[in-house]
Image (cartoon, coloured by chain):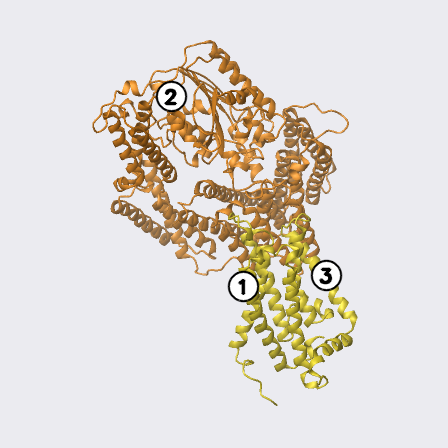
Chain colours: A orange, B yellow
Amino acid sequence: MAGRTSLPQKLEVSQFDVESLYKQRVGKLVLMVIDALRCDFISGRYMTFTSKMISEGKASSITARAHPPTVTLPRLKAMMTGTLPNYIDVLMNFGSSTLTIDSVIRQVANRRMNVVFYGDDTWIKLYPTEFTRSEGTVSFFVNDFIEVDTNVTRNLRVELARNDWDVMILHYLGLDHIGHLEGPSSVHVKPKLHEMDDVIAEIYDKLEENDVLIVCGDHGMKDSGGHGGTSLPELLVPVIIFNHISDCDDQSETINQIDIAPFISFLLGTPIPGDNIGKLNYCLLKHYDPYSVLYALHYNAQQMGNLYINYYEKRELESASFKNFLSAANLFDKWIQTGFTNQYNISALWHYSRSLDIMSNELILVRAQFDLYSMIVSVLMLILVFITTLLKDIDIQLLNFLSIIMGITIVSICGNYTYCIISSYDTGLCSQSISHVMSVAVIAIFIAVKISIILYSQFEFKLPYSKELVFIGVALQTVSLGSSSMVEEEHQVWYFLFVSMCLYFMYKRSGSKKMLIVLMFHRFLRNLNQTGDKWANLSDVGDWLNIGENKQLLSIIYFLTLLIIGGIILHISNQNLFKEITTLKCLHLFSTLGLIMFIYCYRSALGNISFPLIDYPLSKGLLEVKGFWIFFVLFVIVYMSGISYNSASKNILIFQLSGLFFQVFLLIISLLYRPHNCLLLASLFLFVSFFNSGPKLDVELLTFVHYFLGKVFYFYQGNSNSLANIDVGVGYTGLTDYNMFTTGCFLFIHTFAAPLLSYILLVYFLSNKGEFQKNRAFVYQTILFILVQEMLFYSIVVILQRHHLFVWSVFSPKLLYISVHIGLYTVLIFFTEFLYNFVDLLTGQKLHKVIYLNC
Amino acid sequence: MALTKFHGPTLDEIGFFYCISTCVVLTLFSLVLFFNETYLLLGSFSIYPAFLFLGVLELTKWTYSQILHQKDSLIYRNKKLSVILLLWNNLKTSGFKEFFKSIIIVGGSVIVYYILAVLFGAQVLKNFEETFMFSMLLSQLTIFPLCLNVGASDIPHLLSTMESSNAIHSLLIMNIKGTLAGAWLGAIVIPLDWDRPWQEWPIPCSVGAFCGYILSHYVLLIQTFISPTTKFWMPRKKQ
């Protein structure tokens, strides 16, 4: 942590009187963070008081540029530490832990200043001990627009009455919640901004002359309401400073969000956080006396210069930015020596600003340190996995196998550490800590097992695709990931290939009519939710249906879709389960209808759709969801008892079980999906049954088609490779407060609904035809092949493109998505296999019973 | 009008002429389009002169093939009028019915291409002009030559089997495949974020179709050069 000692004491000749040059410049500081505050929200229409103050010159308004990922936790860290956190923080967004690196808050707390905090409890997790008083509100309960904020304001009033604090931080969440659920054009936005405006006025009223209030957003909001991506409405946030004169041009001069950290440090006279790469902007400091401003700039430049040298080692001392810094220091020195009379200060200022500018920008670009060695090792592992997906027969002799594993393990571990010693490279794989050594061992064993499997299996490389065209399609899709725009617009590639595939089947004269229907549906469904980046703002059917005046239509469509879903469920169960048992059949029908009714009621309660005849009371739908779960349990019990009554053969049992899983997930997803998206569920079943009955496809091709459908529907739903498109609101269906497990599950099931369902349907249809048992290895192999080749290619692309401008905004979220996809399919495959063997046991026991009885 | 009656060497000669004329004229033509940036208009009605030119070119090639075919029959001694007479005669023999059928087929193919473009993601009505011109181009490059050289009644059979019974047919099939593949591949550049004027729908696809069309002729030309049996570039021996 940077201390007072980090403040420069002297230049070459001159000595500084640090205490007078770098001191606390404000009385009290209030930092008010309004989550998801967009730049265009600061207007007379929304925030009357604020815009009046700005036009009267009592507050200055600046636009700050946040860096992706535009998610709350990384943005808070950026503002408080002046550094740019990595993408992994997005995952951590849902479980933040104590921040260990130097930050403004720590510096302030270290100076025995009293910091109070009210708002998003992420802050309290980051700084558990630094706040004198604090009260957090849980940030993840998105359905709540009002209470999260009134709670903060109530505490604020208490604090305004007291006088013992120096810094107050407020974090208002309501606006973000509105954005997530309803978007920036929601009717709730205006009253919320009015409320914020009133709070600002209230604080301003209590401020004394040298107290400063900073109002800012942590990130913006997309036009569709989410955030996390890289579009301008998400990146640009307003910063409004009350009681502070600045000379920044509101229109052109955008500062970076990380520049807020050194600015707050300057105001409070605390040391700048050690890792800060934000710069002090002269336009913000203009009205302070030039000597101390120059001193502050010098301090900032020196602090950043140290980081700069650390990163680039000595060779960059020659670079322009560093020279700028040196000559600025020189001029500064001269200016002091000449008794502050000369004009040196102006050119010193210019040089400081310039060097800060360049250093900050370069450090932003190079902030990521790449562990190239580890990356190459992981690609090697991927290649091995890839080869194993191509192998056919594996013939293992245990002893030889083990000895080879041992040998290769030892060789690779030795190889690894030899490499470490030779290269003296700073990488995770060379670290001495226990967890790292363990992971090295695991990796080595993994490599060894893979190599021995490859050695011992027959070298019969057979591409899983006998069909060249399909292979070309897969290859094209994979290769397209090499371009950042294609990653952003991945859905376009899938749609295009999907149409091509259907046309190919049509051309081959297999199931032409069905394919034509599929194509027509596809054309409609791709307009349901516009996604991606380039055309995302085009209006789509989903938006249109959700306008107030189309509520009736949406309600009718939703009702019909739910009926169809109910029909599908009844169809599936009646087909194999409830042929004779009428009581169960009735119960099943009853529970299905009940479930559908509760789903409809839930949406009515939320006000998304209208209920026929009566005015349905608006609520958060807690009661309805409870009802849903009760009927859900009944439904599962009925189905299970149906299965146990039918003592069936193994294949049929798998068929029945996959049917059960399909229905279970279908129901849960219907509950989670937004009303207009439920159409997708019915269409998915239609598509799948068309593909299974129309064109004559063998197992490999069918697996491929199902994977394809999973992808296409995944994008129909409105997903994309930007983190902003995850619908966070879904996670709180029927919950009163944040529950990490349930919320996580809901989010996951909702986002990956399509691949999940299409996989279950694959098992269902295959076992229906009685082909699952003998072909399941094929199925697994095909899926793994597609996934692994994509991952392998993409990893290589990412390694090669690691200095690409979009590596953080486009490539790394996609890597995250691919990994989750692979994880999903791996779990599914393991689970199927587990279930399959479990069923084996069950039917085996039954057989024994039958034999026993016969005896 | 169908060319099936031709015997081998003439057919090969016609094919050779087809390829070489297309390669030379269209390469030059596409260079002109490229350098005066007319290709940026491929999605608007104002490009129609280029379409007319393509049509005239196709007609010329066809007329030449007819002349080759009728060369020996010595009916048309009056050289000046021979071409017109020949065309008229052809029309009369094969019947106006055939002619109208061809028009219907070309028109129908425009509609089919339009539907295909929409299925692939074009707007249904919003970019009518662009999509319409694209489908016009495709049917001019693929179906129009078929109508001229195969005859309207044989087209469905040829398209459904995609099997060629002679050199001209295989040439036509090749050029259909090339054109469609070109249009398909052209779509690749549309989603890229370069924001260039030539990324607008349907320019990349139209350009792709055009390139595919020319390339397939080049491929055929090279094939005839490589293939040992056909040697048209040598002067034909007089019999």
Name the amino acid, label 3: Gly
Which corner quadrant of the image does residue A685 belong to?
top right
Spatial CA span between label 2 and label 3: 75 Å
Which corner quadrant of the image does residue A694 belong to?
bottom right
N-terminal-most mark, 3 or 1: 1
Left or right of residue A514: residue A807? left
- Give the residue number, with chain letter if any, for mark 3: B107
From what the image shows, is residue A814 above or below residue B139? above
Circles 3 and 1, Cβ within 8 Å, touching? The answer is: no
Mark in front: 1 vs 2: 1
Residue A754 screen position, x and y as percent = 59, 43
Closer to us: A415 or A73:
A73
Q: Is residue A509 visible?
A: yes
Within 10 angstroms of label 2, few (less than 14), some, or many (20 or more) residues?
some
- The chain ID associated with circle 2 is A
Circles 2 and 3, Cβ within 8 Å, touching? The answer is: no
- Give the residue number, with chain letter if any, for mark 1: B31
Task: For mark 3, give the secondary structure.
Answer: helix
Q: Are marks 2 and 3 on the same chain?
A: no
Q: Is residue A707 visible?
A: no
- Give the residue number, with chain letter if any, for mark 2: A267
Task: For mark 2, give the secondary structure.
Answer: helix
